[in-house]
Image: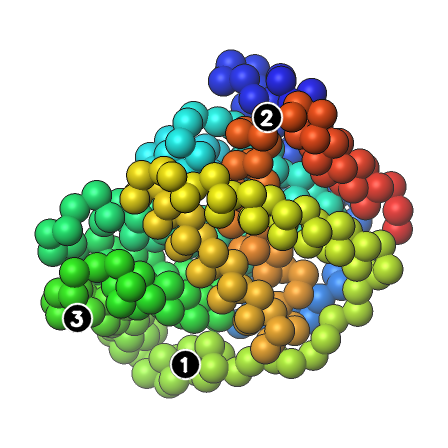
Amino acid sequence: MLRFFRSTKITVIVSILFIGTLIWLRGLLMESEEIISTVKYGTFLFDALNEWLNCIPGLSIVVGLLFFLLTVLMLVFMNVSLRLLAKFSYLPALCYVLLIGGVPHIHLLNPVIIAVILLMIAFIYIVDSFESEQLSYNYFTASALISLSTFFYQYMYVYMLVVWIVIALWRPGYWREWVFTLLGFALPVFFAFSWFFLVDDDISRISIFFYEISDMQRIMPALSIYTLIFFAVISALAISTFLYTMRYIASKKTVIRTGNYVLVIIAVITAGMICAVPDMIPFAWYLLAFPISIFISCYLENVKSKLWGNIVLTILFVMVIFMTIVK
């Protein structure tokens, strides 16, 4: 099994997308079930999109699936652009499909699945800036993307910390790059303000938006024992493969090494947000699965023992099957 998914043949990515589609469509069977999260869809861009899609029954599930598959393909593109695994691989796509597949209750259109795509694009711009020590305008674009993602999912502004930590730790110290981050984040807010003022003629909407993004819910959602078991198993895999990844990248190029460090920052910030705002569970899994899929992929792609690689891959598949059949 590991040998097949390590291959770079087109049949591999087709198989991964097919598996992702089968897993996601279980949402069609769960329409009447209660979602196990009190997640608040408060941001106006997602509300507008969701209201439009709900005019046609079942359309939101299809669009959610398309966004999910786009996220899977983004992981492949991201690795091609940045070579986080130091080689071309479809394994990040497979791992993300299996990690998300293990939590069937979140297989529906939601603001996080859109926000994580924007975060991935911002991540590409951030890591791409490491190729040169010259002044980089990438931080303007990355900040604008994070700001835009906040208009879909209200907690995304916290990922501005990723941009600032990167500039503080790994950039030469250009003060203008700090200014770029502020201007980039302010740009979508300016357009939103202009829309509310000029088109909707309702200036109060912008104050409501700022209230929404600062209104952090601290309600612990009810998670089933099966979901807790899944998270426990994946956490053990994530920690072990993370330690392997840190050892593996120690001798790699600066871009590969620093890119993985940025993924660590994203994972730490996401985990911290989950602890501070339990209401993010389980939809924040879309965000946390992003770096975890790279760490597990690095292990699967480079581990010398095929036996251990197949064991890890088998555990992922077994956990998905287990979570799919249980209620």
Q: Is residue 264 left or right of residue 110?
A: left
- Describe the element under mark 1 as helix, strand or loop: helix
Question: For this rendering, which residue is in front, 211 or 235?
Answer: 235
Q: Give above or below for 197 relative to 69.
A: below
Q: Residue at x 74, y 31 (%)?
A: 311
- Describe the element under mark 3 as helix, strand or loop: helix
**Dot 1 corresponds to which residue?**
210
In which quadrant of the rendered view does residue 162 lie? bottom left
Could you tell me the amino acid type at mark 2? Lys
Q: Residues within 10 Å of mark 2 (few under 14, many from 20)?
A: few
Could you tell me the amino acid type at mark 1? Phe
Q: Is residue 302 left or right of residue 3?
A: left
**Which callout, 2 or 3, points at the residue further toward the start of the chain?**
3
**Dot 2 corresponds to which residue?**
304
Could you tell me the amino acid type at mark 3? Val
Q: Give above or below for 11 relative to 20.
A: above
| CA separation in Å, label 2 and label 1 | 50 Å
**Dot 3 corresponds to which residue?**
179
**Is any part of residue 114 visible from this angle?**
no
Q: Residue at x 79, y 69 (%)?
A: 222
